[in-house]
Image: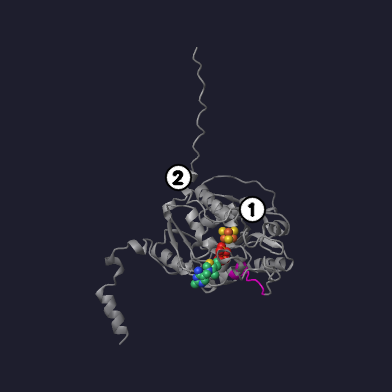
Amino acid sequence: MATTTAVPPAPPRRVNRIGLEQAAYKGNKSTLCAGCGHNAISERIIEAFYEMGVEPHRVIKLSGIGCSSKSPAYFMRTSHGFNAVHGRMPSVATGAMLANRHLIAIGVSGDGDTASIGIGQFVHLMRRNLPIIYIIEDNGCYGLTKGQFSATADIGSVLKTGVVNDLPPIDTCALAIQLGATYVARSFSGDKRQLLALLEGAIAHRGTAMLDVISPCVTFNDHEGSTKSYSYVKDHDEPLGDLSFVPFFEDITVDYDPGTTKEITLHDGSRLLLKKLGEDYDPTNKVEALRVLTESHERGEVVTGLFYVNTQRPDFLQLMNLVDEPLATLPESRVRPPQAALDEVMESLR
Ligand SMILES: Cc1ncc(C[n+]2csc(CCOP(=O)(O)OP(=O)(O)O)c2C)c(N)n1
Ligand code: SF4
């Protein structure tokens, strides 16, 4: 007698709020070293855009040069992309956002690409508050060119060859806060939960969201004596609070004891909940953010979390007073000044 084996039902397809599977947010297979922190960051970026239900065609991925700057190839293959020259991604990003203000920009840079050759462009990007998610994949070295110290390497840290760094580091978070960026955080590639919440918050924010993510280079900077190794960061990580993210499309009421949690409402109505771990921390206070960064660095701690958020400051595109329709698609008849206006300008110059 023939027996029939029951076929188990296929697992339900998991889709996000716009009906896409997570596969729609993936990119090419990574060519970076196995275990490189940059790979984990790409995975969190895929998850964050998927969870937020962002249409991939609305996103533009930008980068400079370095192992980190190769990362945009490994997520969201159907998004727009531009791989700029070393340290020059901010100006390309500024042009792209001026041309089409409806894009969502994500820039991926390295600590070399940002804090060394690109520092001039970086500081002006921060003070403009251009809407962009700007990620520094920070391994304290130039991975692509075989691990020389970068400008974020801590004083006293040691290269594999025994060379000791005797210059002080540039703290990109302190710099970004001081200059005017409006969402500034530090995280660790190995902290999935915190990094995902920070990325989702960055997508919901309107302005420059600068995330410095410690991302160990397993090939050149993961040994004893390095302060950017997996073991050093795990042993010295001091999170500012327990961070969770509630997207605007989930009508979740969160109960918490008064005084234990700070709630921040972002531009699209999403919320960040910062549950107190140690001291009471207010991420809307710029002075406090700079104090915490300075003091924790002096104690040798790697403080992580959302340091500063400002939802009030206008972004660069608002300051430019741009029309809603992207400049890139405005017809020539609307961008060319009429003859009378040109005559007036000429007359004013006589
Ligand atoms: C104009 C220019 N100068 C120098 C280089 C050499 N170079 C390539 S990548 C790099 C540094 C990359 O370091 P980082 O941005 O920290 O990225 P990582 O490789 O560590 O992810 C340098 C100096 C270059 N490509 N172009
Ligand atoms: S050299 Fe370092 S930074 Fe580059 S891919 Fe390998 S582990 Fe990552």
Mark 2 or 1: in front is 1
Q: Quadrant of residue 195?
A: bottom right
For disc 1, the marked residue is: 191
Question: Which residues lie in the magenta part?
Answer: 167-175
For disc 2, the marked residue is: 18
Residue at 55%, 64% (x, y): give it.
144
How has the structure been colored for display? one colour
Q: How packed is label 2: few (under 14 Cα within 10 Å), some, or many (20 or more)?
A: few
- For badge 2, the amino acid type reads Ile
| 151 w.r.t. 265: above or below | below
Relative side of 345 to 113, left or right: left
**Precedes in sequence: disc 2 or disc 1:** 2
Considering depth in this image, is 96 or 140 the residue closer to the camera? Answer: 140
Q: Is residue 248 visible?
A: no
Q: Is residue 306 visible?
A: yes
Q: Quadrant of the C terminus?
A: bottom left
Any magenta on residue 298?
no
Q: CA distance from mark 2 to mark 1?
A: 27 Å
Residue 114 percent across, percent down from the top left: 55, 68
| 171 w.r.t. 28: above or below | below
Mark 1 residue element:
loop
Considering depth in this image, is 161 or 50 the residue closer to the camera? Answer: 161
Considering depth in this image, is 214 or 156 the residue closer to the camera? Answer: 156
